[in-house]
């Protein structure tokens, strides 16, 4: 087992467990910085971990009765389709463009964390066929973000479930965790077909994220939620600052790399 991927997974899991997020927003930048994976390979590898995070989290929420099974089934089809589209789109993007998009996503996550307590619930939860549209839309947005960026998509789907479908916050989180499993599977397989999965990193990352998320969840109950969200938001913005300014490599370096590649051939 790769020890570097183990501590990265553990750190991502702890942070995710503390604030109720998947570990992708932390794992992807750490894999790029310390394991020297490309953004595309980090995205693909993170999605495999998201599958196991979703399974673990969904089981935990289900035992507490805070999963809306019908809502999950309505979310999953569009999420799976959109996850494949997101993964295919990611593989068409250059490294610097994908990094820039990831950076702006981190800023959006930071804002959602800060505004989380102020997200209102609808007076009357949607029932029957009327709730199909918002759930399908939520699945599409979350699935695309998942396949594109290697994240669970919970930061996209939970506010939609709370605002539009009228789900209570904990039910929305449990439902999101369950719904992300098939979409993460589709996204990771699509990236795998493009040769982007760093298979040697997966075991340590998965074990670390699961253990870290469990530990983070336990510690979170002992710490003030406001400060947790603020600290995590600051970390995300600091990380995003290095991504939103990503630029293409100078032409000279690209030409040199091309020449080296031709020489090897």
Image (tube, rainbow, N blue to C red):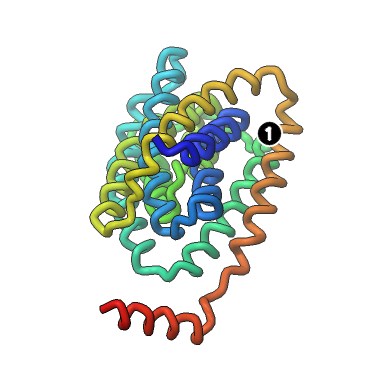
**Image-quadrant location for residue 91:** bottom left
Q: Quadrant of the C terminus?
A: bottom left
Q: Is residue 133 visible?
A: no
Is 29 displayed left or right of 86 in the figure?
right
Is 58 displayed left or right of 189 in the figure?
right
Question: Residue at the front extreme?
Answer: 264
Q: Residue at x 39, y 55 (%)?
A: 41
Secondary structure state at the residue bearing disc 1:
helix
Residue 20 in percent (x, y) is at: 56, 31
Q: Tell me the crowding category of disc 1: few under 14, some 14 to 19, or many 20 or more residues within 10 angstroms, Cα based.
A: few
Q: Residue at x 34, y 56 (%)?
A: 87
Q: Is residue 119 visible?
A: yes
Residue 217 in percent (x, y) is at: 58, 22
Q: Residue at x 59, y 62 (%)?
A: 243
Above or below, 214 relative to 141: above
Residue 23 in percent (x, y) is at: 51, 38
Above or below, 249 relative to 232: below
Residue 197 in percent (x, y) is at: 33, 51
Front-lying residue, 184 or 49:
49
Residue behind mark 1: 117
Is 243 displayed left or right of 35 in the figure?
right
């Amino acid at each position: 087992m790769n020890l570097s991927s183990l501590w990265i997974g553990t750190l991502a899991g702890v942070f995710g467990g503390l604030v109720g997020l998947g570990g992708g927003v932390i794992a992807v930048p750490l894999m790029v910085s310390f394991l020297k994976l490309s953004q595309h390979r980090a995205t693909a590898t993170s999605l495999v971990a998201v599958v196991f995070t979703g399974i673990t989290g969904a089981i935990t929420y289900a035992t507490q009765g805070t999963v809306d099974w019908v809502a999950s089934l309505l979310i999953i089809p569009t999420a799976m389709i959109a996850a494949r589209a997101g993964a295919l789109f990611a593989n068409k993007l250059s490294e610097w463009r994908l990094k820039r998009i990831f950076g702006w996503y981190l800023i959006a996550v930071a804002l959602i964390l800060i505004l989380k307590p102020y997200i209102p619930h609808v007076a009357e939860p949607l029932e029957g066929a009327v709730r199909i549209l918002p759930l399908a839309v939520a699945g599409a947005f979350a699935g695309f973000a998942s396949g594109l960026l290697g994240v669970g998509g919970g930061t996209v789907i939970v506010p939609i479930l709370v605002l539009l479908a009228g789900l209570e916050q904990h039910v929305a989180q449990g439902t999101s965790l369950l719904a992300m499993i098939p979409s993460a599977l589709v996204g990771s397989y699509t990236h795998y077909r493009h040769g982007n999965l760093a298979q040697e990193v997966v075991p340590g990352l998965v074990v670390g994220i699961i253990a870290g998320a469990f530990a983070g969840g336990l510690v979170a109950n002992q710490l003030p939620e406001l400060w947790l969200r603020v600290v995590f938001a600051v970390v995300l913005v600091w990380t995003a600052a290095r991504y939103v300014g990503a630029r293409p490599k100078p032409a000279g370096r690209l030409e040199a790399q091309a020449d080296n590649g031709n020489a090897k051939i």
